[in-house]
Image: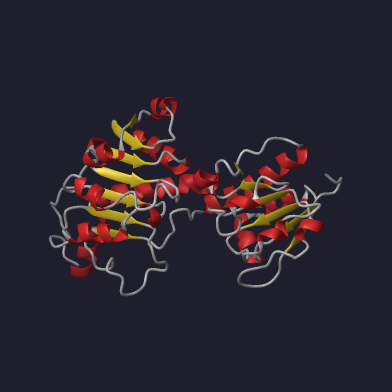
Amino acid sequence: MTSDPRIYVAIRPDEFALLFPTETASALKALGTVEFADGEGKVPVPDDVADAYDVLVTSWSTQPFPQDRLHGPRLRLAVHAAGSVRGLFARDTLGHDLRLGQGGADGMAVAVAEMAVTLTLTILRNVHTHDRALQASRDWVAGGTGRLGRSVHAQRVGIVGLSRTGIRYARMMRGLGVSRLAAYDPFASADLATTLGVRLVGLDELCRTSDVLSLHAPSTSATHRMIGADQLRALPDDAVVVNTARSWVVDESALLAELRTGRISAGLDVFDTEPLPPDSPFFGLPNAVLLPHVAGGTVQARHRQGEIVVEEVARFLRGEELRHEVTPENYDRLA
Protein backbone atom coordinates (compact mmCIF):
# COMPACT_ATOMS: atom_id res chain seq x y z
CA MET A 1 0.00 0.00 0.00
CA THR A 2 1.29 3.46 -0.86
CA SER A 3 2.09 6.00 1.84
CA ASP A 4 -0.70 8.21 0.49
CA PRO A 5 -3.65 5.96 -0.38
CA ARG A 6 -6.06 7.23 -3.02
CA ILE A 7 -9.76 6.78 -2.27
CA TYR A 8 -12.48 7.26 -4.84
CA VAL A 9 -16.01 8.00 -3.59
CA ALA A 10 -18.54 7.04 -6.28
CA ILE A 11 -21.47 8.55 -4.40
CA ARG A 12 -23.62 11.49 -5.43
CA PRO A 13 -22.72 14.60 -3.35
CA ASP A 14 -26.09 14.96 -1.63
CA GLU A 15 -26.09 11.30 -0.64
CA PHE A 16 -22.51 11.56 0.61
CA ALA A 17 -23.56 14.45 2.87
CA LEU A 18 -26.39 12.30 4.23
CA LEU A 19 -24.08 9.38 5.04
CA PHE A 20 -20.95 11.28 6.04
CA PRO A 21 -21.60 14.29 8.29
CA THR A 22 -18.75 16.75 8.69
CA GLU A 23 -16.80 14.86 11.34
CA THR A 24 -17.06 11.52 9.49
CA ALA A 25 -16.15 13.10 6.16
CA SER A 26 -13.08 14.64 7.80
CA ALA A 27 -12.09 11.26 9.22
CA LEU A 28 -12.30 9.72 5.74
CA LYS A 29 -10.20 12.50 4.22
CA ALA A 30 -7.57 11.99 6.92
CA LEU A 31 -6.97 8.45 5.63
CA GLY A 32 -5.61 9.52 2.25
CA THR A 33 -6.31 11.52 -0.86
CA VAL A 34 -10.05 11.41 -1.45
CA GLU A 35 -11.67 12.18 -4.80
CA PHE A 36 -15.39 12.48 -5.33
CA ALA A 37 -17.87 11.74 -8.09
CA ASP A 38 -19.83 14.64 -9.48
CA GLY A 39 -23.24 15.02 -11.04
CA GLU A 40 -26.83 13.98 -10.49
CA GLY A 41 -28.65 10.67 -10.67
CA LYS A 42 -26.46 7.59 -10.74
CA VAL A 43 -22.76 8.44 -10.71
CA PRO A 44 -20.22 6.31 -12.61
CA VAL A 45 -17.14 4.50 -11.39
CA PRO A 46 -14.12 5.68 -13.42
CA ASP A 47 -12.82 3.37 -16.12
CA ASP A 48 -9.35 3.52 -14.53
CA VAL A 49 -10.49 3.01 -10.93
CA ALA A 50 -8.44 -0.19 -10.52
CA ASP A 51 -5.33 1.49 -11.93
CA ALA A 52 -5.52 4.84 -10.17
CA TYR A 53 -7.10 4.18 -6.75
CA ASP A 54 -6.52 1.93 -3.74
CA VAL A 55 -10.04 2.11 -2.29
CA LEU A 56 -13.48 2.50 -3.85
CA VAL A 57 -16.52 3.64 -1.84
CA THR A 58 -19.99 3.00 -3.27
CA SER A 59 -23.62 3.40 -2.25
CA TRP A 60 -27.18 3.55 -3.63
CA SER A 61 -26.29 6.32 -6.08
CA THR A 62 -23.42 4.42 -7.69
CA GLN A 63 -24.06 3.45 -11.29
CA PRO A 64 -23.63 -0.29 -12.02
CA PHE A 65 -20.40 -1.04 -13.86
CA PRO A 66 -18.67 -3.91 -15.67
CA GLN A 67 -17.07 -6.18 -13.10
CA ASP A 68 -13.72 -6.30 -14.89
CA ARG A 69 -13.38 -2.60 -14.11
CA LEU A 70 -12.52 -3.62 -10.53
CA HIS A 71 -9.47 -5.65 -11.47
CA GLY A 72 -6.17 -3.87 -11.89
CA PRO A 73 -2.79 -3.29 -10.30
CA ARG A 74 -3.88 -0.89 -7.58
CA LEU A 75 -7.47 -1.30 -6.33
CA ARG A 76 -7.59 -3.67 -3.35
CA LEU A 77 -10.67 -2.63 -1.35
CA ALA A 78 -14.24 -1.59 -2.07
CA VAL A 79 -16.64 -0.61 0.71
CA HIS A 80 -20.37 -0.33 0.06
CA ALA A 81 -22.08 2.27 2.22
CA ALA A 82 -25.62 1.04 1.54
CA GLY A 83 -27.43 -2.28 2.04
CA SER A 84 -27.16 -5.21 -0.35
CA VAL A 85 -24.01 -5.28 -2.50
CA ARG A 86 -25.59 -7.55 -5.11
CA GLY A 87 -26.53 -4.76 -7.51
CA LEU A 88 -22.91 -3.68 -7.87
CA PHE A 89 -20.63 -6.55 -6.89
CA ALA A 90 -20.95 -10.10 -8.20
CA ARG A 91 -19.71 -13.03 -6.16
CA ASP A 92 -17.14 -13.91 -8.84
CA THR A 93 -15.58 -10.47 -8.48
CA LEU A 94 -14.40 -11.36 -4.99
CA GLY A 95 -11.66 -13.72 -3.93
CA HIS A 96 -9.01 -12.40 -6.34
CA ASP A 97 -7.09 -9.29 -5.32
CA LEU A 98 -10.18 -7.33 -4.31
CA ARG A 99 -11.75 -7.31 -0.86
CA LEU A 100 -15.24 -6.01 -0.19
CA GLY A 101 -16.64 -4.45 2.97
CA GLN A 102 -20.34 -3.98 3.65
CA GLY A 103 -20.80 -0.70 5.42
CA GLY A 104 -24.54 -0.27 5.29
CA ALA A 105 -26.26 -3.41 6.53
CA ASP A 106 -24.99 -3.36 10.09
CA GLY A 107 -25.52 0.38 10.30
CA MET A 108 -29.19 -0.04 9.39
CA ALA A 109 -29.85 -3.16 11.47
CA VAL A 110 -31.03 -1.31 14.57
CA ALA A 111 -33.31 0.95 12.53
CA VAL A 112 -34.87 -1.97 10.65
CA ALA A 113 -35.41 -3.90 13.88
CA GLU A 114 -37.00 -0.82 15.45
CA MET A 115 -39.41 -0.55 12.54
CA ALA A 116 -40.29 -4.24 12.85
CA VAL A 117 -41.07 -3.62 16.52
CA THR A 118 -43.10 -0.53 15.57
CA LEU A 119 -45.19 -2.48 13.08
CA THR A 120 -45.67 -5.29 15.60
CA LEU A 121 -46.96 -2.91 18.27
CA THR A 122 -49.01 -0.86 15.80
CA ILE A 123 -51.02 -3.87 14.71
CA LEU A 124 -51.31 -5.55 18.10
CA ARG A 125 -52.65 -2.33 19.64
CA ASN A 126 -54.88 -1.42 16.64
CA VAL A 127 -53.11 1.90 16.16
CA HIS A 128 -53.73 1.84 12.42
CA THR A 129 -57.43 1.03 12.64
CA HIS A 130 -58.07 3.55 15.42
CA ASP A 131 -56.30 6.29 13.49
CA ARG A 132 -58.03 5.56 10.18
CA ALA A 133 -61.47 5.39 11.74
CA LEU A 134 -61.04 8.45 13.93
CA GLN A 135 -59.56 10.55 11.11
CA ALA A 136 -62.33 9.53 8.73
CA SER A 137 -65.26 9.94 11.15
CA ARG A 138 -63.97 12.47 13.70
CA ASP A 139 -66.14 10.48 16.08
CA TRP A 140 -64.73 9.05 19.32
CA VAL A 141 -66.94 5.95 19.31
CA ALA A 142 -66.46 5.26 15.61
CA GLY A 143 -62.73 5.59 16.23
CA GLY A 144 -62.91 2.40 18.20
CA THR A 145 -63.02 3.43 21.84
CA GLY A 146 -63.52 0.31 23.91
CA ARG A 147 -61.95 -1.99 21.32
CA LEU A 148 -59.27 -4.06 23.02
CA GLY A 149 -55.81 -4.63 21.65
CA ARG A 150 -53.28 -7.28 22.60
CA SER A 151 -50.24 -6.87 24.86
CA VAL A 152 -46.98 -7.75 23.17
CA HIS A 153 -45.56 -9.49 26.23
CA ALA A 154 -48.34 -12.11 26.03
CA GLN A 155 -47.65 -13.05 22.41
CA ARG A 156 -45.74 -15.99 20.98
CA VAL A 157 -43.21 -14.28 18.75
CA GLY A 158 -41.53 -16.12 15.89
CA ILE A 159 -38.50 -14.84 14.01
CA VAL A 160 -37.52 -16.06 10.55
CA GLY A 161 -33.78 -15.49 10.32
CA LEU A 162 -31.45 -14.55 13.17
CA SER A 163 -29.64 -12.06 10.96
CA ARG A 164 -28.26 -8.74 12.21
CA THR A 165 -31.81 -7.38 12.32
CA GLY A 166 -33.31 -10.64 13.58
CA ILE A 167 -30.93 -10.64 16.54
CA ARG A 168 -31.74 -7.06 17.40
CA TYR A 169 -35.47 -7.65 17.02
CA ALA A 170 -35.20 -10.60 19.42
CA ARG A 171 -33.41 -8.44 21.98
CA MET A 172 -35.99 -5.68 21.66
CA MET A 173 -38.84 -8.15 22.09
CA ARG A 174 -37.16 -9.49 25.20
CA GLY A 175 -36.87 -5.95 26.47
CA LEU A 176 -40.63 -5.52 25.98
CA GLY A 177 -41.29 -8.53 28.17
CA VAL A 178 -41.84 -11.24 25.55
CA SER A 179 -41.00 -14.58 27.15
CA ARG A 180 -42.03 -16.93 24.34
CA LEU A 181 -39.56 -16.32 21.53
CA ALA A 182 -38.79 -18.87 18.82
CA ALA A 183 -36.82 -18.69 15.59
CA TYR A 184 -36.09 -20.57 12.41
CA ASP A 185 -32.56 -20.20 11.07
CA PRO A 186 -30.55 -23.20 9.83
CA PHE A 187 -27.32 -21.22 10.30
CA ALA A 188 -27.95 -20.11 13.89
CA SER A 189 -25.99 -21.80 16.64
CA ALA A 190 -27.48 -23.19 19.82
CA ASP A 191 -25.21 -20.83 21.78
CA LEU A 192 -26.61 -17.79 19.99
CA ALA A 193 -30.17 -18.94 20.58
CA THR A 194 -29.45 -19.49 24.28
CA THR A 195 -27.88 -16.05 24.58
CA LEU A 196 -30.93 -14.45 23.00
CA GLY A 197 -33.42 -16.55 24.96
CA VAL A 198 -34.80 -17.94 21.71
CA ARG A 199 -35.96 -21.49 21.01
CA LEU A 200 -34.84 -22.85 17.62
CA VAL A 201 -37.56 -24.75 15.75
CA GLY A 202 -38.43 -25.83 12.23
CA LEU A 203 -40.20 -23.40 9.91
CA ASP A 204 -43.53 -25.24 9.91
CA GLU A 205 -43.62 -25.42 13.69
CA LEU A 206 -42.69 -21.74 13.92
CA CYS A 207 -45.62 -20.78 11.73
CA ARG A 208 -48.08 -22.97 13.66
CA THR A 209 -47.06 -21.51 17.00
CA SER A 210 -46.43 -17.80 16.33
CA ASP A 211 -48.91 -15.05 17.08
CA VAL A 212 -46.38 -12.67 15.53
CA LEU A 213 -44.14 -13.80 12.68
CA SER A 214 -41.35 -11.32 11.91
CA LEU A 215 -39.19 -11.89 8.83
CA HIS A 216 -35.47 -11.11 8.86
CA ALA A 217 -34.04 -13.59 6.34
CA PRO A 218 -31.72 -12.64 3.45
CA SER A 219 -32.52 -13.07 -0.24
CA THR A 220 -30.96 -16.36 -1.28
CA SER A 221 -32.02 -19.29 -3.43
CA ALA A 222 -32.99 -21.13 -0.24
CA THR A 223 -35.22 -18.34 1.09
CA HIS A 224 -37.16 -17.60 -2.10
CA ARG A 225 -40.89 -17.75 -1.27
CA MET A 226 -40.09 -19.74 1.88
CA ILE A 227 -43.21 -18.23 3.45
CA GLY A 228 -45.83 -19.57 1.06
CA ALA A 229 -49.50 -20.49 1.15
CA ASP A 230 -48.97 -23.51 3.42
CA GLN A 231 -46.99 -21.51 5.98
CA LEU A 232 -49.47 -18.64 5.95
CA ARG A 233 -52.44 -20.97 6.38
CA ALA A 234 -50.66 -22.58 9.33
CA LEU A 235 -50.54 -19.29 11.24
CA PRO A 236 -53.00 -18.99 14.14
CA ASP A 237 -56.08 -16.83 13.69
CA ASP A 238 -55.34 -13.13 14.24
CA ALA A 239 -51.62 -13.67 13.66
CA VAL A 240 -49.45 -10.74 12.58
CA VAL A 241 -46.89 -11.01 9.77
CA VAL A 242 -44.16 -8.36 9.72
CA ASN A 243 -41.79 -8.06 6.77
CA THR A 244 -39.01 -5.47 6.87
CA ALA A 245 -36.57 -7.81 5.08
CA ARG A 246 -37.28 -8.59 1.42
CA SER A 247 -40.50 -9.53 -0.40
CA TRP A 248 -38.39 -12.30 -1.96
CA VAL A 249 -38.96 -14.31 1.22
CA VAL A 250 -42.77 -14.30 0.89
CA ASP A 251 -45.16 -15.53 -1.76
CA GLU A 252 -46.88 -12.19 -2.24
CA SER A 253 -49.93 -13.65 -3.99
CA ALA A 254 -50.45 -16.10 -1.16
CA LEU A 255 -50.06 -13.32 1.40
CA LEU A 256 -52.64 -11.21 -0.40
CA ALA A 257 -55.07 -14.12 -0.52
CA GLU A 258 -54.70 -14.72 3.21
CA LEU A 259 -55.05 -11.03 4.07
CA ARG A 260 -58.24 -10.80 2.03
CA THR A 261 -59.85 -13.40 4.28
CA GLY A 262 -59.31 -11.04 7.21
CA ARG A 263 -57.88 -13.91 9.25
CA ILE A 264 -54.42 -12.39 9.73
CA SER A 265 -52.82 -8.93 9.58
CA ALA A 266 -49.54 -7.71 8.14
CA GLY A 267 -47.07 -4.87 8.46
CA LEU A 268 -45.10 -4.56 5.22
CA ASP A 269 -42.15 -2.40 4.21
CA VAL A 270 -41.14 -4.36 1.10
CA PHE A 271 -42.99 -5.50 -2.02
CA ASP A 272 -42.35 -7.41 -5.24
CA THR A 273 -42.86 -4.23 -7.24
CA GLU A 274 -41.42 -1.00 -5.86
CA PRO A 275 -42.62 1.70 -5.90
CA LEU A 276 -45.96 0.08 -5.14
CA PRO A 277 -48.22 0.84 -8.13
CA PRO A 278 -51.37 2.91 -7.47
CA ASP A 279 -53.61 -0.02 -8.39
CA SER A 280 -51.87 -2.44 -6.01
CA PRO A 281 -54.37 -4.75 -4.29
CA PHE A 282 -52.58 -4.07 -1.02
CA PHE A 283 -54.12 -0.60 -0.92
CA GLY A 284 -57.37 -0.46 0.99
CA LEU A 285 -56.84 -3.59 3.05
CA PRO A 286 -57.97 -2.71 6.57
CA ASN A 287 -55.68 -5.32 8.10
CA ALA A 288 -52.45 -4.17 6.44
CA VAL A 289 -50.01 -1.41 7.36
CA LEU A 290 -47.93 -0.37 4.34
CA LEU A 291 -44.61 1.47 4.31
CA PRO A 292 -42.59 2.66 1.27
CA HIS A 293 -39.39 0.70 2.03
CA VAL A 294 -38.22 3.05 4.78
CA ALA A 295 -37.41 0.66 7.64
CA GLY A 296 -33.68 1.43 7.60
CA GLY A 297 -34.14 5.18 7.25
CA THR A 298 -33.14 7.03 10.39
CA VAL A 299 -30.65 9.87 10.76
CA GLN A 300 -28.63 7.72 13.13
CA ALA A 301 -28.57 4.75 10.77
CA ARG A 302 -27.33 6.84 7.86
CA HIS A 303 -24.57 8.38 9.95
CA ARG A 304 -23.56 4.98 11.28
CA GLN A 305 -23.27 3.68 7.71
CA GLY A 306 -20.67 6.34 6.95
CA GLU A 307 -18.83 5.66 10.19
CA ILE A 308 -18.57 1.95 9.39
CA VAL A 309 -17.14 2.74 5.95
CA VAL A 310 -14.43 4.91 7.52
CA GLU A 311 -13.69 2.24 10.13
CA GLU A 312 -13.36 -0.49 7.50
CA VAL A 313 -11.08 1.60 5.30
CA ALA A 314 -8.91 2.47 8.32
CA ARG A 315 -8.62 -1.18 9.33
CA PHE A 316 -7.66 -2.17 5.82
CA LEU A 317 -4.97 0.50 5.58
CA ARG A 318 -3.54 -0.65 8.92
CA GLY A 319 -3.46 -4.24 7.73
CA GLU A 320 -6.12 -5.34 10.21
CA GLU A 321 -9.02 -7.75 9.75
CA LEU A 322 -12.20 -6.28 8.29
CA ARG A 323 -15.28 -6.58 10.51
CA HIS A 324 -17.88 -6.46 7.74
CA GLU A 325 -16.18 -8.31 4.90
CA VAL A 326 -18.20 -10.02 2.17
CA THR A 327 -16.44 -13.07 0.77
CA PRO A 328 -17.38 -15.74 -1.78
CA GLU A 329 -18.12 -18.03 1.18
CA ASN A 330 -20.56 -15.72 3.02
CA TYR A 331 -21.88 -13.86 -0.05
CA ASP A 332 -25.28 -15.57 0.00
CA ARG A 333 -25.89 -14.73 3.65
CA LEU A 334 -24.42 -11.22 3.82
CA ALA A 335 -24.66 -9.74 0.35
Q: Is residue 270 left or right of residue 318?
A: left
Observer-nearest of 28 and 243: 243
Give the percent coordinates (x, y) of residue 60: 57, 61
Report the residue at 60% width, 48% height from top: 103
Q: Nearer the viewer, residue 304 or 322?
A: 322
> Which of these two is toward me, 205 or 238?
205
Quarter of the view holding residue 72: bottom right
Identity of the residue drawn at 61% across and 55% down = 89
Name the residue nearer the viewer: 84 or 15: 84
Identity of the residue drawn at 62% across and 38% down: 323
Q: Residue furthest bottom?
A: 279
Q: Is residue 121 visible?
A: yes
Figure check: 65 above or below 75: below
Q: Is 42 rendered above or below residue 202?
A: below
**In this view, 104 is above or below 141:** above
Q: How many marks?
A: 0
Q: Residue at x 35, y 33 (%)?
A: 174
Outermost residue toward the right? 3
Question: Residue 189, how many percent across, how many down?
Answer: 43, 29
Residue 229, image x, y percentages: 24, 53
Q: Position of residue 303 (x, y in %)?
A: 59, 51
Q: Can the viewer see residue 177?
A: no
